[in-house]
Image (cartoon, helix red, strand yellow):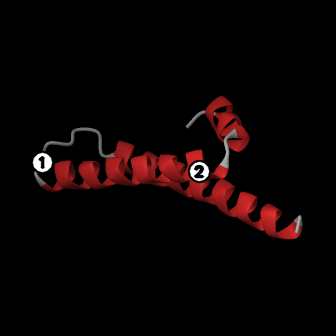
Amino acid sequence: MKKKQFDELKTKDLKALKEQVKKVDQEIFKLKMDKRTAKLKNISLLGQKKVDLAKIKTIVREKELNSWNSL
């Protein structure tokens, strides 16, 4: 995930981010299955998707905490 894409994620609302988490999680699952069946050629892609998922989850958590602090 590029810096520009990461900045764009910060502007999305919580619902859109949670949908993005589901989408990336499904991609990771598919990559894991491809790896186990020897269809995956670029194994580093799996690690990158995991990093992307962690970044998105971090943004989700920040937004959740900010919504609690504003109450």
**Which circle, 2 or 1, is nearer the viewer?**
2
Query: Would you name the residue on which mark 2 appears?
Result: 15
Residue wearing tag 1? 38
Judged from the image, the secondary structure of the residue bearing numbered disc 2 is helix
Residue at 73% in and 58% down: 63
Q: Secondary structure at mark 1?
A: loop
Q: Position of residue 42 (x, y in %)?
A: 29, 39
Bin the neighbour count of mark 2 within 10 Å (Cα to Cα): few under 14, some 14-19, many 20 and up.
few
Q: Residue farthest to the right?
A: 70
Q: Residue at x 74, y 60 (%)?
A: 62
Q: In the image, what residue occupies the spot 12% across and 48% down?
A: 38
Quarter location, residue 33 = bottom left
Please identify the residue farthest to the front as the structure is shown.
71
Q: Report which quarter residue 45 is drawn in.
A: top left
Quarter of the image with the C terminus is bottom right
Question: Disc 2 and disc 1: Cα gap in Å?
Answer: 35 Å
Say what amino acid the circle numbered 1 marks: Ala
Residue 66 spot, x, y in % from top left: 81, 62
Label placed on residue 24: none
Looking at the picture, which amino acid does disc 2 mark? Lys
Locate residue 56, reporting x and y percent: 59, 51
Dot 2 or dot 1: first in sequence order is 2
Q: Residue at x 55, y 57 (%)?
A: 54
